[in-house]
Amino acid sequence: MTDRVALAFSGGLDTTVCVPLLEEEYGYDDVIGVTVDVGQPDEEFVEAEATAEALDLDHYIVDARAEFSELCLDAVRANATYQGYP
């Protein structure tokens, strides 16, 4: 049995460092990178893909734009605030 973990992966410095840390310090045999698309700029996906390729990391992009927009609309309808921001 393989010890496998999914990592919320942006391709930035923090998540890039997490890959060898999870493998070497925590003993995971298989680290999988997951980037969630909530409508951010395409450049962020390019960075994540390039970094994942350089790390030989299996990488998946999950399209959550519809779910995220619904959540945001629900928050607006509810007049929700977060630390004073709508």
Image (tube, rainbow, N blue to C red):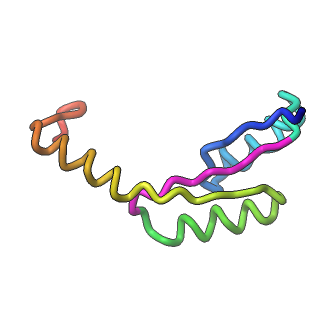
Front one among 65 and 40: 65
Residue 22 horizontal side relative to residue 76, left or right? right
> Is residue 31 covered in magenta?
yes
Q: Residue furthest front?
A: 1
What residue do we see at 63% from left, 54% from top?
Answer: 12
The picture quadrant where one finds residue 22 is top right
What residue do we see at 69% from left, 57% from top?
Answer: 59
Chief SS of the magenta region? strand
Front one among 3 and 53: 3
Say if 83 sits above or below 58 in the image. above
Q: Quadrant of the C terminus?
A: top left
Front one among 15 and 37: 37
What residue do we see at 49% from left, 71% from top?
Answer: 42
What residue do we see at 73% from left, 48% from top?
Answer: 32
Q: How many marks?
A: 0
Q: Residue furthest top?
A: 26
> Is residue 33 covered in magenta?
yes
The picture quadrant where one finds residue 60 is bottom right
Find residue 52 and report its horizontal and vertical position in percent.
74, 60
Find residue 25 and report its horizontal and vertical position in percent.
86, 29
Find residue 34 and report its horizontal and vertical position in percent.
62, 51
Say if 74 sits above or below 80 in the image. below
- Magenta part of the chain: 30-39
Find residue 73 and report its horizontal and vertical position in percent.
19, 49
Q: Quadrant of the N terminus?
A: top right
